[in-house]
Amino acid sequence: APLRHALKWRQRRPDAPSSTPIKGIAAVYGIVCLIGFTLLAFDVPLVNMPAERGIESWNGRAKVIFDNSSVIMGMTGGCFFLVALACTVRASPWHSWILLAAIYIPRVVSPFAFAGVPHSADLFILGMAMARWRIT
């Protein structure tokens, strides 16, 4: 809801300087993204879940997602941060292209297992941003 609030605020006030709550939203999402990429750099999963059975079990699938939780947190947090930053600095049509590149280029360069879960969230964030700022 904070991101939706920021998007609506920027749409109503396209030329206004950003307010403190909008800057705060961008800062929080930036910190989430930074934590995710820091965990990734040190190869530390957000949740350390033991696998008791094979990949076919629910526990095995959940373990793969939790093992990649730092990537998921960094990528999805990064998408939230880019949109919130665009709300802070008066978005242009280029912000949607930048967000689109930020979603797809890392997945092509460095794919990871079970990427569909965070990818769906990233595409939802892209859809919210493109509903406000059309790609030209």
Image (cartoon, rainbow, N blue to C red):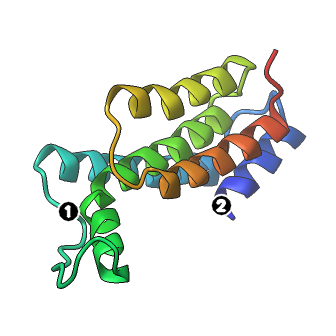
Give the distance between the C-alpha atoms of the residues marked 1 and 2, in whole angstroms.
26 Å
Q: Which is closer to the viewer, label 1 or label 2?
A: 1
Q: Quadrant of the N terminus?
A: bottom right
Front-most of residues 106 and 25: 106
Q: Quadrant of the C terminus?
A: top right
Q: Amino acid at mark 1?
A: Pro
Front-most of residues 75 and 111: 111
Which disc, if any, is residue 2?
Answer: 2
Front-most of residues 54 and 79: 54
Q: Which residue is mark 1?
A: 45
Image coords of residue 117 (percent x, y):
50, 58
Disc 2 residue crowd, few under 14, some 14–19, many 20+, Cα 10 Å: some
In the rendered image of this protein, does residue 59 appear above or below residue 30?
Answer: below
Image coords of residue 112 (percent x, y):
33, 45
User: Which quadrant of the structure image shows residue 92?
Assistant: top right
Going from N to C along the chain, the mark reached first, 1 or 2, is 2
In the rendered image of this protein, does residue 132 appear above or below residue 5?
Answer: above
Give me the residue at 42% from left, 34% from top.
107
